[in-house]
């Protein structure tokens, strides 16, 4: 019997990813740290990101935010790309201790 047949491909991919990159980035904790330390409100989905400051002014916009859940490979990939772009922006404009801890993982 093929040894790989015992493990679903998705599990193997996650295992390889974890071995190469370590623990996953905890996005909710990062969002909370930005919201708390910088007084921002972050709305995010696969369709877009909208970040406002304390006075309600939009400080970051990517796409058109709609409250919807990403479904399927394409939407999940789009959401991950938007998160990555937002985190790179936040490292410059709204950095926190939690973000500085993962800074090396955001550089490409």
Image (cartoon, rainbow, N blue to C red):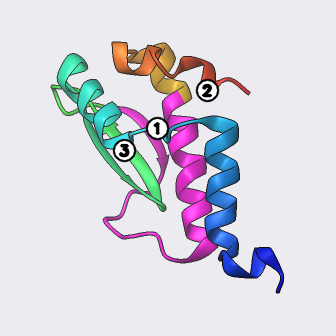
Apparent side of residue 58 relative to residue 90 in the rendered image (left or right) = left
Q: Residues within 10 Å of mark 2 (few under 14, many from 20)?
A: few
The disc, 1 or 3, on the residue closer to the chain's N-terminal end is: 1
Which mark, residue 105? 2
| Residue at (40% x, 15% y) in the render | 95
Residues in magenta, as a range: 59-87
Q: Residues within 10 Å of mark 3 (few under 14, many from 20)?
A: some
- The image quadrant where one finds the C terminus is top right
Query: How far across and down, in percent of the image, does residue 85 sit?
Result: 57, 37
User: What separation in Å lies between label 1 and label 3 (alpha carbons)?
Assistant: 20 Å
Residue 9 inside the magenta-drawn segment: no
Q: Residues within 10 Å of mark 1 (few under 14, many from 20)?
A: few
The disc, 2 or 3, on the residue closer to the chain's N-terminal end is: 3
Which mark, residue 50? 3
Disc 1 target residue: 25
* Quadrant in the rendering for residue 14: bottom right
| Residue at (49% x, 76% y) in the render | 71
Q: Residue furthest right?
A: 2
Apparent side of residue 37 relative to residue 87 in the rendered image (left or right) = left
| Residue at (38% x, 41% y) in the render | 27
* Quadrant in the rendering for residue 58: top left
Which mark, residue 52? none
Q: Using the image as rendered, state which of residue 15 and residue 6 is in the foreground.
A: 6
Disc 1 to disc 3: CB gap under 8 Å = no
Kindly report which numbered mark, 1 or 3, lies closer to the viewer in this rendering.
1
């Amino acid at each position: 019997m093929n040894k790989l047949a015992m493990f679903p491909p998705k599990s193997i991919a996650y295992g390889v990813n974890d071995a190469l990159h370590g623990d996953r980035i905890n996005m909710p904790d990062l969002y909370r740290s930005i919201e708390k330390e910088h007084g921002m409100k972050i709305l995010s989905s696969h369709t877009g990101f909208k970040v406002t400051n304390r006075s309600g002014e939009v400080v970051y916009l990517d796409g058109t935010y709609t409250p919807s859940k990403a479904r399927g490979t394409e939407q999940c990939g789009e959401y991950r790309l938007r998160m990555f772009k937002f985190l790179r922006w936040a490292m410059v404009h709204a950095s926190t201790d939690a973000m500085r801890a993962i800074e090396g993982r955001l550089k490409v």
